[in-house]
Amino acid sequence: MTDEMRDRLTRLDPMRQGVSTESVATPSSRKLLEDIMSTHVEESTAPRTTRWLPAAAVVVVVAGVIGALTLGGGSGEPLSLSAGVDNSMTSCIQFSEEVLAKMPVAFEGTVTSADGETIGLEVDHWFKGGDASQVVINAPAGMEALIGGIPFEVGESYLITANDGTVNYCGFSGVSTPELRGSFEAAFAG
């Protein structure tokens, strides 16, 4: 493991250094895992892709305002989205076409550049919420390590949804596969 990778993992780790941990093989760890896995979770149909810390919420709101300003009008300006913030507390809801259909921004695009923390996409098809021919995603290093994070590669085609100026993960965005494309077409038909 390289030093750079170790540094990235350390930044993503929610546990402070020096906190003692218990082996997963101990009876108390197994009981805790069983309790967690047995706990009933009520599912909501309302989209909820992430939980943000208060400071991160401010960043998301600012990105949303910028995204909303660049979205309308067909001015030729690229749509600017955020890949989110480096937040290890991210949680996912179960993917469904019903939830997918509620996403305000959805498009298919091909990555034209991946320079540091900026991803450029040429929009191939808008499903909902825009008309820009290009999208720029600001992606802090390490985001691909989060749940459902996307490792963008130049030349690859992706299906992307966004809410409040922030890209959604957890299956609501990803590499353009026939299965995901079929879900997008079904969710945004008509």
Image (cartoon, rainbow, N blue to C red):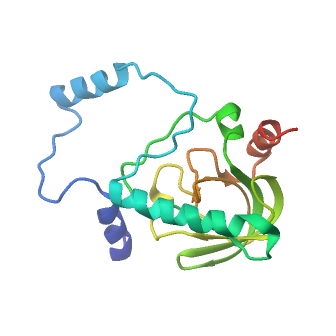
From this viewpoint, which residue is outermost toward the right?
A: 190
Asked if residue 28 lies left or right of residue 1, the reply is: left
* Residue at the spot 44% in from the left edge and 43% down from the top edge: 91
Where is residue 31 shown, x and y percent of the image?
22, 23
Asked if residue 127 lies left or right of residue 13, the reply is: right
Where is residue 60 shown, x and y percent of the image?
48, 60
* Residue at the spot 16% in from the left edge and 27% down from the top edge: 28
- Asked if residue 39 shows in the view, the reply is yes
Relative to 38, does residue 64 appear above or below in the rendering? below
Relative to 182, does residue 154 appear above or below in the rendering? below
* Residue at the spot 61% in from the left edge and 44% down from the top edge: 171
Where is residue 66 shown, x and y percent of the image?
59, 68
> 82 and 143: which one is in front?
82
Picture quarter with the C terminus: top right
Quadrant for residue 114, please give it: bottom right
> 35 and 133: which one is in front?
133
Relative to 86, does residue 44 appear above or below in the rendering? above
Relative to 30, does residue 3 appear above or below in the rendering? below
From this viewpoint, which residue is outermost toward the bottom?
A: 115
- Asked if residue 82 shows in the view, the reply is no
Where is residue 26 shown, x and y percent of the image?
17, 31
